[in-house]
Amino acid sequence: MSIFNKFSQWQFSKDRLEFFSDAVFAIVVTLLVLELKVPRLPHDCTTQEIINSLRDIVPKFYSWVISFFFVMLIWLHHHQIFLMTTKSDYGMMWINIILLFFISFLPFPTALMGEYPHQPLNVTIWGVTVCLTTLVLNWLYYYNTHNYLSDTYDRNSVKKNVRLSLFAVPLIYLVAALLAWVSVYISYIIYLIVPFLYILPLDKEKKADSGTHH
Amino acid sequence: MSIFNKFSQWQFSKDRLEFFSDAVFAIVVTLLVLELKVPRLPHDCTTQEIINSLRDIVPKFYSWVISFFFVMLIWLHHHQIFLMTTKSDYGMMWINIILLFFISFLPFPTALMGEYPHQPLNVTIWGVTVCLTTLVLNWLYYYNTHNYLSDTYDRNSVKKNVRLSLFAVPLIYLVAALLAWVSVYISYIIYLIVPFLYILPLDKEKKADSGTHH
Amino acid sequence: MSIFNKFSQWQFSKDRLEFFSDAVFAIVVTLLVLELKVPRLPHDCTTQEIINSLRDIVPKFYSWVISFFFVMLIWLHHHQIFLMTTKSDYGMMWINIILLFFISFLPFPTALMGEYPHQPLNVTIWGVTVCLTTLVLNWLYYYNTHNYLSDTYDRNSVKKNVRLSLFAVPLIYLVAALLAWVSVYISYIIYLIVPFLYILPLDKEKKADSGTHH
Amino acid sequence: MSIFNKFSQWQFSKDRLEFFSDAVFAIVVTLLVLELKVPRLPHDCTTQEIINSLRDIVPKFYSWVISFFFVMLIWLHHHQIFLMTTKSDYGMMWINIILLFFISFLPFPTALMGEYPHQPLNVTIWGVTVCLTTLVLNWLYYYNTHNYLSDTYDRNSVKKNVRLSLFAVPLIYLVAALLAWVSVYISYIIYLIVPFLYILPLDKEKKADSGTHH
């Protein structure tokens, strides 16, 4: 991390970094729902007309759901990573800012995909955005565990785990993003499933660690 | 909570969970007001025209009020539950995420009900959303007090209280949601009253507890 | 505060109350700017056309400024009040919720006044909203200092100060709100000045206190 | 800071000031993306039409990027300044409020510049806004280090640094803002580069400090 070296004498508060990131995660996750716009109908519309117009926004609802759970899982991992980390520095600040950059961008591809759900381009844009987000998250994970790993964790098992997980999840998202050009439905299914698989990697290294210490 | 068992070795910060939830509650409660859109009138409109157009958005105002107090009461209970809880784990994280999922969805049914206040379907959708929200809140209450109840509380009275309250409030909301098909006004009245009744359950068990310890 | 008595055995975290309020203040103060909508012009518009359309939104800008400083001053006083307070209870929670209710409503009268700045009705609605907000703030000030005043403050001088300040500021706002029917410009001037006068009351009692203790 | 003198006996919590500012920074940085509106096209539009309409919003995307990094750098410096500061007072509160005033205003010039990117006036408005923001940040830096500098910092090197940096960055932004009338592209390039240069000043004084103490 040579480019950050000359700033290494700056002090940073890990608490304030975590707090700021949490605020951004919370705002993004809540803003996402604003894209679920109430359909514009005549005020004396029938129940059937409302049902039909709600059916029209099902893709928006689906986009919201996958983005919501994606942000929550980034938050869960962010949380985990910082519990494993003893202190913060300038490099960590910047990697975190890049992570927040992608997270705060997410409402746009989510809205685009919800508005034109059958366009493979939009599905790909969402996938590439989350692919890059997970890539930066992994960078943060590598940076923090490499430099400031808490003593309660086993360095070797963390290292092995980092090597395995670093490209797996971003790669899956990239493949899913490209498969949209075959069928957008394949992408949609993978987008919903991956978050629930992605929670595993960090856990494995915790097990190894607990096996080492007890 | 067997499905969460294998993650039980993860560490979690109760503080960060509370903080993150508070941020989501605060954002949702503040975003709700954005649905109170300023009426579009000619710029040389008369005072009477403004009064008329404000009268048109009374249903939006009413929707905002009941959603505001609903979120505040969920916040108050969330607060109480976590004061009774000694630590957090992976299962608690996920139940809390599901709670935030429903809370962050609330602006949509609120807007829908405010826009088409005479449609029973919209009134039902709002009712079902808050019914599910209180159900998840009760799940969180059960999970936390069952697994990590602070020693200053009496386990037996909490247990009895949980059994009584677990389905009462969600059931009232469900009934109110269905009554919208008889008359939306019945639902509106119940929606406003229930929050102010719902504050009671947790209190009873505190009394029992204070009777046990002093 | 008899209606709150039976809840007096609930525990509350003053920190979480302050945090939650701060989040609401921060969101409201930031959302206010969203009402400053970019004018819709043809994309090949001239600089002169942009200047003209910016001139049209000067009233919106003015509304934003007075609401911004109003919220900041409520925040400053909220901050002061809670530094004087040793603990929180159920009644305090509810008074604070009512304060947040009015604060989170503020974007609506701000937008209404900015959109139709010459309508006395809108100017009055803004004034009445902030009048009620300061009234609730004074209620909170009375409740906290009466029940949980920190030992570092002199009870007598606080009490005297409360009696003096409790109705002065809300009354000024009410008068200003009504004067809009004579001329909206009088109201606008008072609205901008009052916040900068309103910062005084709490200060006086601090001086008395420092005179008592040193 | 004579006008603040009579308030100097107020107490203030540095934590709550930092927290509140962080919340405002986080909200502003996240709201900025809402200006990236999804293009309105017919629902059976082609991929090519989407690409074209995305190309149209490239200026909005660029405006978002420079505003995002500008806010993050203000946050980084704010963070640094408060780590150098031992306590807070009434004057600091108000300088900070003025800083938040400009930060919370930023979404408007960002939207204006993104909407009409070829209008020098809009590019100038953005530049003047950030010029004033950095000026207030420097005021805060001067005020805090002059009055409440932490003992771990060398007062002389901080003082020298303040004198050097106080007008350099705001001046660069002002010049860039005016150069928009020659060519908006020159301004756009400077706007993107400056944040990455601006991170240096505080660092130099830390070096001097570490040279003094070790």
Image (cartoon, coloured by chain):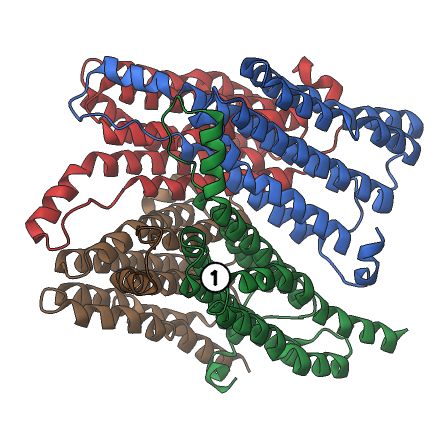
Chain colours: A blue, B red, C brown, D green
The front one of D95 and B182 is D95
How many labels were placed on the picture? 1
Quick one: label 1, few (<14), some, or many (20+) residues within 10 Å? some
The amino acid type of the residue labelled 1 equals His
Left or right: residue D202 versus residue B167 is right
Res C8 quadrant in image: top left
The front one of D76 and D192 is D192
- Above or below for C203 versus B87: below
The front one of D205 and A156 is D205
x and y percentages locating residue C128 in the rendered image: 21, 57
Residue drawn at 28 percent across, 33 percent down: B63
Q: Quadrant of the N terminus of chain B?
A: top right
Residue drawn at 9 percent across, 47 percent down: B49
User: Does residue A88 show up?
Assistant: no
The front one of B24 and A35 is A35
Left or right: residue D1 versus residue C117 is right
- Kindly identify which chain the residue marked by label 1 belongs to: C
x and y percentages locating residue A185 in the rendered image: 54, 14
Q: Secondary structure at mark 1?
A: helix
Residue drawn at 60 percent across, 21 percent down: A191
Q: Residue furthest bottom?
A: D2
x and y percentages locating residue D140 in the rendered image: 58, 73
Residue denoted by label 1: C79
Res B149 quadrant in image: top right
x and y percentages locating residue B146 in the rendered image: 61, 22
User: Does residue A33 show up?
Assistant: yes
